[in-house]
């Protein structure tokens, strides 16, 4: 059965203004049509702030479940079951997130454990 994923890229002042998360958003948008998700779907959107500013840029990936309250989850997406918040995401990791998480359904644990920003490559 195919799955649908929502990818939310933080655009808050730390992630957006200081760490250029718009470049991550653009990278996800560019990579998405190039990746085979094996029948799964993904949408990429921007989000105001996850409150983990010192660990950004932050990206949340979650499976969209049928019948869920989308409005409530938009207010608190980290509360959704199966949500994974990635910290210090680099441009060269967008394809890996799409392939591992959105295609295979396997969150990338090491990207959830970063404590400080990682320099962009």
Image (spheres, rainbow, N blue to C red):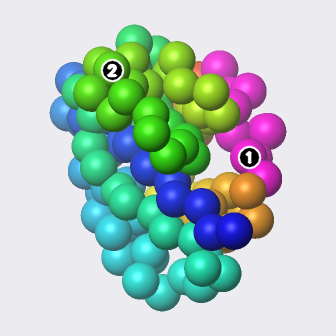
What is the x, y in percent for residue 67? 45, 39
The residue under the point 69% across, 68% down is: 1
Q: Is residue 78 magenta?
A: no
Q: Which mark is residue 59?
A: none
**Between tags 2 and 1, which lies in front?**
2
Q: Which mark is residue 107?
A: 1
What is the x, y in percent for residue 120? 49, 51
The residue under the point 29% across, 64% down is: 26
Category of crowding for the residue at label 1, using alpha-carbon neighbours closer than 10 angstroms: few (below 14), some (14–19), many (at least 20) = many
Quarter location, residue 101? bottom right
Q: Is residue 26 above or below residue 73?
A: below
Q: Is residue 31 visible?
A: yes
Category of crowding for the residue at label 2, using alpha-carbon neighbours closer than 10 angstroms: few (below 14), some (14–19), many (at least 20) = few
**Relative depth, front residue between 23 and 99:** 99
**Relative depth, front residue between 76 and 116:** 76
Is residue 91 rendered to the left or right of residue 106? left
**Relative depth, front residue between 52 and 92:** 52
Q: Main secondary structure of the magenta part?
A: loop
Residue extending farthest top: 51
**Badges 2 and 1: C-beta atoms under 8 Å apart?**
no
Dot 2 or dot 1: first in sequence order is 2
| Disc 2 to disc 1, C-alpha distance | 23 Å
The residue under the point 44% across, 49% down is: 7
The residue under the point 48% across, 87% down is: 34
What is the x, y in percent for residue 82? 66, 34
Secondary structure at numbered mark 2: helix
Residue extending farthest front: 67
Stretch in magenta: 106-115
Q: Which residue is mark 2?
A: 72
Q: Is residue 108 magenta?
A: yes
């Amino acid at each position: 059965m195919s799955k649908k994923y929502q990818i939310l890229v933080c655009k808050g002042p730390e992630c957006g203004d200081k760490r250029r998360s718009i470049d991550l958003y653009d990278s996800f948008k560019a990579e998405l049509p190039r990746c085979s998700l094996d029948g799964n779907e993904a949408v990429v959107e921007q989000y105001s702030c996850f409150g983990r500013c010192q660990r950004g840029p932050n990206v949340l990936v979650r499976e969209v479940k049928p019948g869920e309250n989308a409005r409530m989850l938009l207010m608190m997406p980290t509360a959704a079951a199966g949500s994974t918040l990635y910290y210090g995401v680099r441009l060269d990791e967008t394809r890996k997130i799409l392939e591992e998480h959105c295609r295979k359904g396997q969150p990338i644990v090491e990207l959830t454990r970063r404590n400080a920003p990682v320099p962009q490559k």
